[in-house]
Image (cartoon, rainbow, N blue to C red):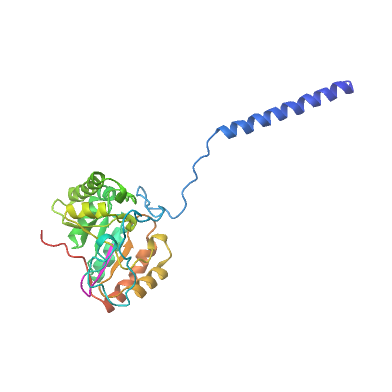
Amino acid sequence: MPRSTLRATGIVTLIAAALLGSAYALGRSLVPDQPRPRTGVAASVNSPHYADQPPATPDSSASVGPSPTPDGGQHPSDTGDGPFGSLVSTGSPRVALTFDDGPDPQYTPQVLALLREYGVKATFCVVGENAERNPDLIQEIVAAGHTLCNHSWNHDLTLGKRSPDVIRADLLRTNEAIRAAVPDARIAYFRQPGGAWTRPVVSVCEELGMAPLHWTVDPSDWTTPGAGKITAAVMTETGPGAIVLMHDAGGNRTGTVQALHSLLPELMDRFQLEALPIGTT
């Protein structure tokens, strides 16, 4: 083949390669980026994972009450000293353990077994969609003498910024899911996800006969810091009248369960532990 023909063939090949490369790059630019998989610990199979939600921020349009802090052993004289009058004390020297985001078929039974082993009653702030999925665990919580708390239908951190009608529908739907499992269940408390309290959400929960429940001690167990750090935070910050926040669902709660093995006997040495009272109405 003549040299001129070879040169022409090579030039054509280079042009064709360049055109193909440009077409590929153009095609890639027209395809939207695929969402990255979520990071973090895995939740139980078929259970919602709440731990990777961003932290809530309070409604800046309203004045927020003082945030709970470790009180050095002195409980507040008024139990409603939390944001927008939410409860941050048991109102007595007794300490209340609370567990959020359940029920979860993997971790809630483990928490219930440990509480039963030590004869401790606690308060479970349950998510409506989880109550609907696990009615047997709602029944077990109530049968064991623990207190129930409404924690919204699907852990909506922005629920407090919605209209009163939307808030009311969410809370009622959650109560209905709980009472589908236990028809006469007494639901005396509501806890706003993320502690993102607003005046409307407090007004609606009180209208429905529930007290807004905040906390005094938060070991941030939802960030999975490990059993040692959870235990140290709870033991350091808990004083008489404290309401301790922990989680039995929403992610990997192995650290919380492990921490309870040492926390329960240590707390019982220092305090009386109680489930928050549910009243008589």
Q: Is residue 215 visible?
A: yes
Q: Is residue 240 above or below residue 200?
A: below
Q: Looking at the image, which is closer to me, 259 or 160? A: 160
Q: Quadrant of the C terminus?
A: bottom left
Quadrant of residue 238 within the rendered picture = bottom left
Q: Looking at the image, which is closer to me, 215 or 114? A: 215
* Residue 165 left/right relative to 7: left
Q: Is residue 154 above or below residue 242?
A: above
Residue at (26, 54) in percent of width and height: 199
Q: Is residue 262 visible?
A: no
Q: Quadrant of the N terminus?
A: top right
Residue at (30, 72) in percent of width and height: 264
Quadrant of residue 76 within the rendered picture = bottom left
Q: Is residue 16 above or below residue 265?
A: above
Position of residue 182 measured from the top left corner of the image (x, y, whole percent): 17, 52
Residue at (80, 26) in percent of width and height: 11
Position of residue 260 measured from the top left corner of the image (x, y, whole percent): 33, 68
* Residue 4 left/right relative to 127: right
For the view shown, which residue lies furthest in the right direction?
A: 2
Position of residue 213 measured from the top left corner of the image (x, y, whole percent): 25, 61
Quadrant of residue 148 within the rendered picture = bottom left
Determine if the magenta segment contains residue 94.
yes
Determine if the magenta segment contains residue 192.
no
Magenta-highlighted residues? 91-98
